Image: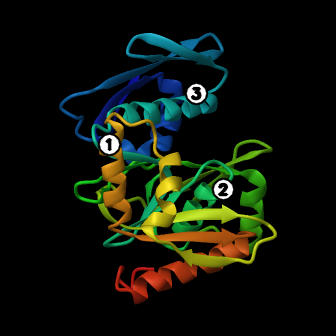
Amino acid sequence: MRLLFLEYPKLSVSLSVPDNVAEGFRTNFANAIASPPPATVQVEFLVRQRNADLALEKNGTLIGVFPNPTELIFALEENLENALIERLDGWIGLHAGAVALPDMSIVTVGHPDTGKTTTTFQLVELGLELLCEEVTPIDPSTIRVHPFPGVLTLDRRYAEAFRASYPVTGGALTYHSVEMARYAAGRVRKEAVPLGALLFPAFDPSCRPRLEALSPAEVLTDIFQYCFTPTVDDEQLYDSVIRVIERCRLFRMHTRDIESARGLLVELLSELARAGAINQGSA
């Protein structure tokens, strides 16, 4: 067996895997591997070989049996997300991806099929560093985004269409099935970064592509839809969300295809640079 330690904000994990599949796990979770090991571990995962299948245990309890390492890795990623959400303790957890520039971060908020992951992917391809995937932890007292990087899951048709128009240079894009692609970013930020902008993608094939600046009042209702169930009371969550959205730039990005999204993201980076929110030489 191979023992790996993964470290995230407020969450340290031990992961024991059979030697014959260990390299795949090490590669998938490379950006979270802790060396030296953390002083304490909150959650223990164990992968056992069961004939041709693999069993996943969490803290000694079986949580699933899987036919191959890939499906087990997907289940493990979901369990890690849930474990982090349970331990946010006063932080906000958004269903969002995040990328980092030298001195600020852009958080892309949204439900599945709204363009959240593809926007994160495009920003990394434009030269930014991946900071978070799926769950984005924000400390409302400091307005800093803490890293929770992972491998991005994309629709294969989207990935193929993107690759047909642009070279993929920011990471490794691989195809895992007729429906799914995975993207491992080559550049990942491992330190907390101040929040600079919240971006709300809105995909509509019939829309007029545009970048729309928003006020805190315009996003207040929407933002709660993207908050994971908090470990704090509703009043504290409300106060924290208000503090966050009043301290950053807010945008809705209306896109209809890959090309319009790329153009608007370039426009967003230029807008932030003109406002002095980022180092103009970083994008």
Identify the disc placed on residue 114.
2
The residue that mark 3 highlights is 72
For residue 266, above or below residue 217? below
Q: Residue at x 63, y 67 (%)?
A: 168
Confirm whether residue 167 shows in the render: no
Decide if residue 158 is on the left or right side of residue 69: right
What's under tag 1, amino acid-wise?
Glu
**Quadrant housing residue 209:** bottom right
For residue 234, above or below residue 146? above
Q: Residue at x 48, y 30 (%)?
A: 22
Decide if residue 79 is on the left or right side of residue 252: left
Question: Considering only order in the chain, which callout, 2 or 3, is on the residue closer to the N terminus?
Answer: 3
Identify the disc placed on residue 99.
none
Secondary structure at badge 2 equals loop
The residue that mark 1 highlights is 235
Question: Considering only order in the chain, which callout, 3 or 1, is on the residue closer to the N terminus?
Answer: 3
Secondary structure at badge 3 equals helix
How many residues crowd around disc 1 within 10 Å: few (fewer than 14), some, or many (20 or more)?
A: few
What's under tag 3, amino acid-wise?
Leu
